[in-house]
Image (tube, coloured by chain):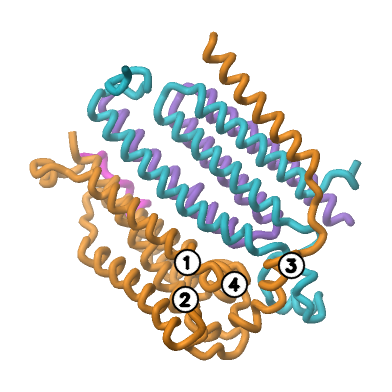
Chain colours: A cyan, B purple, C orange
């Protein structure tokens, strides 16, 4: 059993389940703040998924310091994990914080206009 | 070999806790508990990033996702509760 | 009832897709393609010990400019949205009084937090860290000072000037790369230096420090606007 499971597969499953939980919350909740919380959980799940795709077994972080050089005999190519997904996720985390802050500003303005937080009551644009 | 075994057990434990906290965040009726549970999910994700040999991403997720995002939620909740009192 | 069954249908289709993706997943065993190029030649070409920093600032520098632009756009939209009316600006936030513990602890901790944030973004090319992490740490120091005294007025001129000058200098350093080195945002127009020193990797410490200051100023501005919005009725 232990040779079937490794850290990459476990993280993949965790990412998938968090995406599913986030989508379920996004579709089924009625309170605007709950919808924004579900959006945050969805973003976290996607980030875990992307970093898990760049993981390689038995290798270490992509920072070339003394321990990596000594262990690898100056052969960096075989001793680090993939650095490209980590760079993409770095950007994604900062942008998702900006989007959450913007969503919450919209929620405050909506609350100020109608004094309620249920999305069913905001039907001004419905036909 | 022992090292890897510990990582797998730790990852399974953290994953289960994160999924349970995510479900609590969605199902609970009080808003403040939902927001704190989302912050705890972010914290567990940061530990998982560290297990997957990504220290830059772990630092960014802990500072921004777990710290500043929860703070902004509480500003909005304060405004709502002040009206409802 | 219809809504619940439709939600269950959507989630079931996602589960089906994810199951197929998981079953066909083969874990990688070696780096391939462009990651191999970054791993082999990254230290020699760019001179940075942290390969993620080398990818974010140099190899994928244009994406970083896009991200900084999106953050700037978000901060300006929030400033516009949460603008107070004239009569609300002079009000004072009524609160129960912050505790003595918070005021004293913040006076000790805030300089240490700023110093730590500056250390993180200046050493981005040697240790894990960089501009975004350092900027978030500086913003959390500013939030601590706001929490200790909710009526504190943050000097908006300082934030505006720091943010604008950092952004303009970032683009100017990129354009200098066109004339003096290989292309846009090439960091080799300053000499690469000794591998592992603080002043190595060309222009990467300068670029990352500018990004750190800019992100810290923007997030502090967002949080200050949220704090001021507590004043309005």
C155 relative to A99, above or below? below
Q: Distance between the residues labelled 3 and 2?
A: 25 Å
Q: Is residue B43 left or right of residue C206?
A: right
| Quadrant housing the C terminus of chain A | top left
Marks 1 and 2 close (CB-CB < 8 Å): yes
Estimate the spatial distance between the alpha carbons at disc 4 and disc 3, rounded to whole Å.
Answer: 15 Å
Residue occupied by mark 1:
C62
**At numbered mark 3, what does the secondary structure look like: helix, strand or loop?**
loop
Q: Name the residue under label 3.
A: A80
Q: Which of marks 1 and 2 is nearer the N terminus?
A: 1
Q: What stretch is highlighted in magenta?
A: C94-103
Numbered label attached to residue C185: 2
Chain letter for the residue marked with disc 3 in the picture: A
Residue drawn at (34%, 69%), measured in percent from left and top?
A: C167
Label disc, if present, on residue B51 of the rendered structure: none
Between disc 2 and disc 4, the foreground one is 2
Q: Along the line of sight, which residue is nearer the eye, B85 or A78?
A: A78
In three-dimensional space, the C-alpha distance between marks 2 and 4, rounded to whole angstroms, equals 21 Å
**Chain containing mark 4:** C
Main SS type for the magenta part? loop
- Asked which quadrant contains residue A126, the reply is top left
């Amino acid at each position: 059993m232990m040779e079937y499971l490794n850290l990459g597969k476990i993280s993949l499953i965790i990412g998938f389940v968090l995406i599913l939980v986030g989508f379920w919350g996004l579709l089924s909740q009625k309170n605007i703040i709950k919808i924004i919380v579900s959006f945050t959980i969805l973003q976290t799940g996607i980030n875990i998924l992307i970093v898990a795709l760049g993981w390689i077994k038995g290798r270490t972080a992509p920072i070339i310091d003394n321990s990596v050089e000594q262990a690898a005999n100056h052969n960096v190519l075989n001793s680090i994990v993939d650095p490209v997904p980590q760079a993409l996720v770095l950007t994604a985390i900062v942008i998702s914080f900006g989007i959450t802050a913007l969503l919450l500003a919209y929620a405050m303005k909506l609350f100020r206009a109608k004094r309620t937080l249920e999305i069913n009551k905001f039907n001004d644009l419905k036909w | 070999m022992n090292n890897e075994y510990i990582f797998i057990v730790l990852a399974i434990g953290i994953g289960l806790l994160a999924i349970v906290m995510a479900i609590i965040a969605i199902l609970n009726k009080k808003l403040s508990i939902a927001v704190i549970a989302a912050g705890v999910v972010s914290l567990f994700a940061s530990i998982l990033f560290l297990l997957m040999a990504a220290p830059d991403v772990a630092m960014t997720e802990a500072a921004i996702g777990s710290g500043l995002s929860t703070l902004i939620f509480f500003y909005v909740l304060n405004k709502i509760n002040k009206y409802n009192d | 009832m219809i809504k619940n069954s439709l939600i269950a249908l959507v989630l079931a289709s996602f589960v089906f897709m994810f199951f197929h993706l998981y079953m066909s997943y083969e874990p990688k065993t070696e780096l391939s393609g462009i990651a191999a190029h970054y791993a082999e030649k990254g230290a020699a070409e760019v001179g940075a010990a942290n390969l993620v920093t080398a990818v974010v600032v140099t190899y994928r520098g244009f994406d970083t400019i896009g991200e900084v632009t999106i953050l700037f756009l978000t901060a300006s939209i929030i400033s516009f949205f949460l603008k107070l009316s004239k009569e609300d600006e002079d009000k004072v936030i009524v609160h129960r009084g912050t505790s003595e513990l918070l005021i004293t602890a913040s006076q000790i901790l805030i300089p240490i937090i700023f110093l730590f944030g500056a250390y993180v973004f200046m050493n981005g090319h040697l240790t894990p860290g960089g501009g975004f992490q350092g900027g978030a740490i500086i913003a959390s120091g500013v939030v601590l000072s706001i929490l200790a005294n909710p009526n504190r007025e943050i000097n908006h001129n300082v934030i505006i000037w720091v943010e604008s000058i950092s952004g303009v200098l970032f683009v100017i350093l990129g354009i200098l790369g066109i004339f003096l080195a290989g292309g846009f945002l090439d960091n080799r127009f300053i000499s690469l230096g000794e591998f592992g020193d603080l002043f190595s990797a060309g222009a990467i410490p300068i670029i990352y420090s500018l990004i750190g200051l800019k992100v810290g100023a923007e997030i502090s501005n967002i949080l200050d606007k949220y704090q001021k919005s507590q004043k309005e009725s």
